[in-house]
Amino acid sequence: MIHCPECGREIPERDFNVSTDLAFCSVCGTNYSYSELVQAENDGDVYRPDLPPRGFRVTNIPPYEEVLSYRFFSSGVWGLLIFGIIWCGMTGVFTVNIWFVEVTPWPVKLFLLPFQVIGLCIQGAVLVTLFGRGELRVRDGMLETFAGIGGLGLTRRCDLAKIERVAIEPTSMRQNNRPIYGVQIRCDGRKRFVGRWLSSEKQQYIESFIRHHIRRNDARKKGFWA
């Protein structure tokens, strides 16, 4: 089966012309390169807005052309939560005991404060994992990436036409001495990662989403979708 990159509908065989390398979607009224669609299907590079992975949602609420939303939740958060509670509890007890002993010198009192900061960072990571979300928003030829909780977070923007590479690559983060993968976006020589900690299936869907909108943006300029 060959699907339309724009609407995700299946393109019937009667709308293929293999001799001229054309495929026509009657729903969108758009021409495609038949060979490229076949290759994309075989590579699993077909973006299906109607079939997002579990935990993903695709919307097109104005002013955005399309928004891909996903949660950061991972089952590993429970282990991190337990570790954070134990860490904060033990270091907290030592810190309180030392601070309330008047004869304790100040350098010793301040010694355990960095351990409390580490504990707070762990709990912050737990909150982000439990309640955080990521979004990829497309409008006016721009790709916006958002990561945060509610309306608070970090938003970055890049021109779709200036994206040089989109691929699933290892990040600088490691778990059990193994690199953690994410979807790398290289734009204007700068690299950023989205979708860390997600499954390979979900990361591939994010990659397909970005590639789809890059092709769509290029096609608008050329007047033909290839």
Image (cartoon, rainbow, N blue to C red):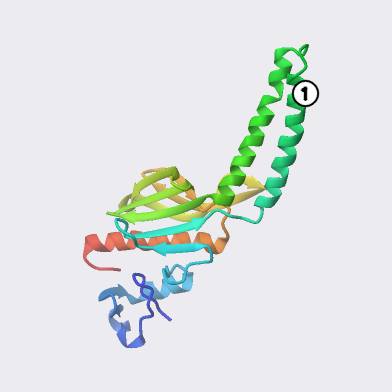
Depicted 99 relative to depicted 66: above or below: above
- Quadrant, the C terminus: bottom left
Quarter of the image for residue 9 reads bottom left
Where is residue 154 shown, x and y percent of the image? 44, 42
Q: Position of residue 79 (x, y in %)?
A: 71, 50
Q: Position of residue 167 (x, y in %)?
A: 47, 56
In the displayed structure image, the side of residue 86 where residue 72 appears, left or right = left
Q: Secondary structure at mark 1?
A: helix
Q: Is residue 133 visible?
A: yes
Q: Amino acid at mark 1?
A: Asn
Rendered position, 40 above or below 66: below
| Left or right: 164 as drawn, with respect to 101 | left
**Point 56% across, 46% down: residue:** 128
Q: Nearer the viewer, residue 57 or 200?
A: 57
Q: Quadrant of residue 87?
A: top right
Could you tell whether 177 is left or right of 134 in the image?
right
Q: Is residue 103 left or right of residue 208?
A: right
**Which one is in front, 157 or 130?**
130
The residue identified by callout 1 is 97
What residue sits 62% from the left and 46% below the top?
A: 126
Badge 1: few (under 14), some or many (20 or more) residues near its Cα, within 10 Å?
few
- For the question of whether residue 173 can be seen, the reply is no
Q: Is residue 111 above or below residue 7?
A: above
Residue at point 49%, 62% (across, down): 56
- State which quarter of the image contains the N terminus: bottom left
- How many numbered marks does the figure carry? 1
Front position in the image: 170 or 68: 68
Q: Position of residue 205 (x, y in %)?
A: 48, 63
